[in-house]
Image (cartoon, rainbow, N blue to C red):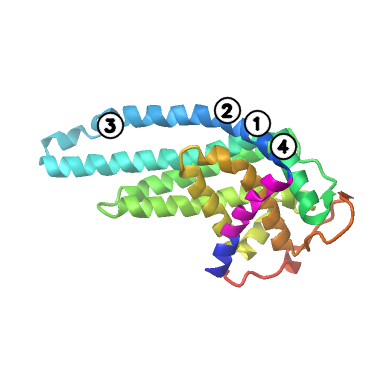
Amino acid sequence: MREFLAGAALLARGLGQWRRTPGAMALGLIPGAVVGLIFGAALVTWGLVLPGLVDDWTPFADAWAPFWAGALRTAIGLASFGAALLLVVVSFTAVTLAVGEPFYDRIWRATERSATGVVPDVEYGFWRAVGDSVRLILRGILAAALAWLIGLVPFVGGVLGFVTGVLLTGWLLADELTSRALSARGLDRRARKGLLRTHRARALGFGVATQLCFLVPLGAVAVMPAAVAGSTLWAHAALGIPPRSSGTPGTLPAQPAPVADAPADSAR
C-alpha cells in the first residue's frame, strides 16, 4: 500500500510543474480540451441512446416480471455505459498524446530539466506516438470488454466491473504515460514492461490516481499536463535517477538502463 500511495503522490508532484513552467503546462491544456469536447459529446450521445438500445437487446425480458426485467436492463445499461466510459478514458489519453505530441514533448523536457538538470537527447516522434496510441486503444477495448462482462454479474457486477476497469485502465495509462521518459533512456518495450512489473504497486498507484481524475468532469483536460510531468518523475524514481542538485540544464545522451539495476518495489 505504501508504494501504491507513493505512485499516486507522483501525480500530485506533477502538478508542481505548473509552478516551474506554467507556459508549457498551459499549452498542454489545448489538445486535451479539443479531444475532450469530441469524446465528451460522444459519451453523452451514447448515454442518451443507450436505454433504447438495451430494450432492443432484451426483447425476451418483456415477458418477465417488471422487477426482474428492470434489474436485467439496468445491469446491462450500467455495464455498457461503464465500459464505454473506460474506453473513452483510454482513447482520450491515446488520441490526446498523439495529437498533442509537440505540447507534451515540451512538458516532458521541462520536467526533465527542472528535476534532473539534463534532458536525454532522444526524439520521441509523432509517428511513434501514433503507434503507441493505436496499441493503447486496442488494449483499452479488451479491458472495457472484460469490465463489461464482469458488470453483468447480478447485484455486485457494477462494483466489481468498475473496480476491474479502473485497475486495468490505470495500468494501461501508467504504461503509456511513462513510455516517453523510459524510451528516452534507451529502454525498449520489453524493458519498459519489465520495469513496470518490478514496480507494479507504484505503477498502479500512479495509473489509478490518473484514471480517477480523468473520470471527473473536465478532469482529463486539467490533469493531462500533470500526468505527463508525473510520469516523468515516476521514471526517475523507478530508475533511481537522483534529483537535480546543482548545475545548468543541458542534454544527456540516452543510455540503456538495465531493469535489473532498478531499485526493487517493496510492494510487488
Residue farthest front in this picture: 19
Secondary element at tag 1: helix
* Quadrant location of the C terminus in the rendered image: bottom right
Query: What mark, if any, has residue 23 been given in the picture?
Result: 4
**Sequence-earlier tag: 4 or 2:** 4
Apparent side of residue 114 relative to residue 29 in the rendered image (left or right): right
Badge 1 is on which residue? 99
Query: What mark, if any, has residue 34 been given in the picture?
Result: 2
- Magenta stretch? 8-20
Q: Does the magenta-highlighted stretch encompass residue 188? A: no
Please tell me how crowded label 1 is: few (under 14), some (14-19), or many (20+) other residues with Cα within 10 Å.
Answer: some
Eye-nearest disc, 1 or 2: 2
Q: Give the residue drawn at x 43%, y 40%.
A: 85
Measured in 3D between alpha carbons, the distance from the residue under mark 4 to the one under mark 2, in whole angstroms, is: 18 Å
Badge 3 is on which residue? 51
Measured in 3D between alpha carbons, the distance from the residue under mark 2 to the one under mark 3, in whole angstroms, is: 28 Å
Label 3 sits on what residue type?
A: Pro
Please report contact status of discs 1 and 2: CB closer than 8 Å, yes or no: yes
